[in-house]
Image: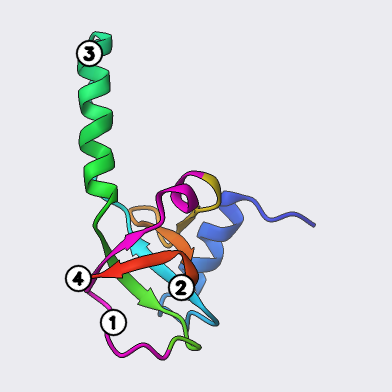
Amino acid sequence: MQKTHKDLLNYLKLNKTMGKLLGNRVYLELPKKEESKLVVDDNTKEALQKELLKKMSRLKVHSVGTAITDPDLIVGCEVMVDPSSLRDKTLVIPLSEEEDVLLVSIFDIIYIW
């Protein structure tokens, strides 16, 4: 049986405490995307997209998997993720109704600040 987004949210509500993130995985905080009800031209859309890409180049670590042994990769540090990985294979995971995170592999992190 395939789980839906709603099923996952209900599961997370039942398990209010955050469990362990297993393996070589890392949760990253999603940058806030400013929502606008204004209609903008193509140049403005392009500028907004570039601004979002700048934010995506430096992401804050939310949780670190149990198999990760790098002492520099800790909760709260900022990392750069391979842009092709962000585009092709990153999953957005809902932790609650208000909070979503990106799930990436340790092997996709290319820089730690």
- The Cα–Cα distance between marks 4 and 1, rounded to whole angstroms, is 11 Å
Amino acid under label 3?
Answer: Asn
- The Cα–Cα distance between marks 3 and 4, rounded to whole angstroms, is 32 Å
Work out whether residue 93 or residue 7 is closer to the camera in this orientation and state it: 93
Work out whether residue 23 or residue 88 is closer to the camera in this orientation and state it: 88
Query: Tags 4 and 1 in contact by the CB under 8 Å rule?
Result: no
Answer with mark 2 or mark 4, whichever residue precedes in sequence: 2
- The Cα–Cα distance between marks 3 and 2, rounded to whole angstroms, is 35 Å
Q: Quadrant of residue 38?
A: top left
Answer with mark 3 or mark 2, whichever residue precedes in sequence: 3
Which coloring applies here? rainbow
Amino acid under label 4?
Answer: Trp
Magenta residues, as a range? Answer: 69-87
Q: Which of the image's four quarters has the C terminus?
A: bottom left
Residue that mark 2 sits on = 106
At horizontal 49% and vertical 53% (from top left) the residue drawn is 85
Disc marking residue 74 = 1
Identify the secondary structure beneath mark 4: loop
Amino acid under label 1?
Answer: Ile
Residue that mark 3 sits on = 43
Residue 15 drawn above or below residue 52: below
Residue that mark 4 sits on = 113
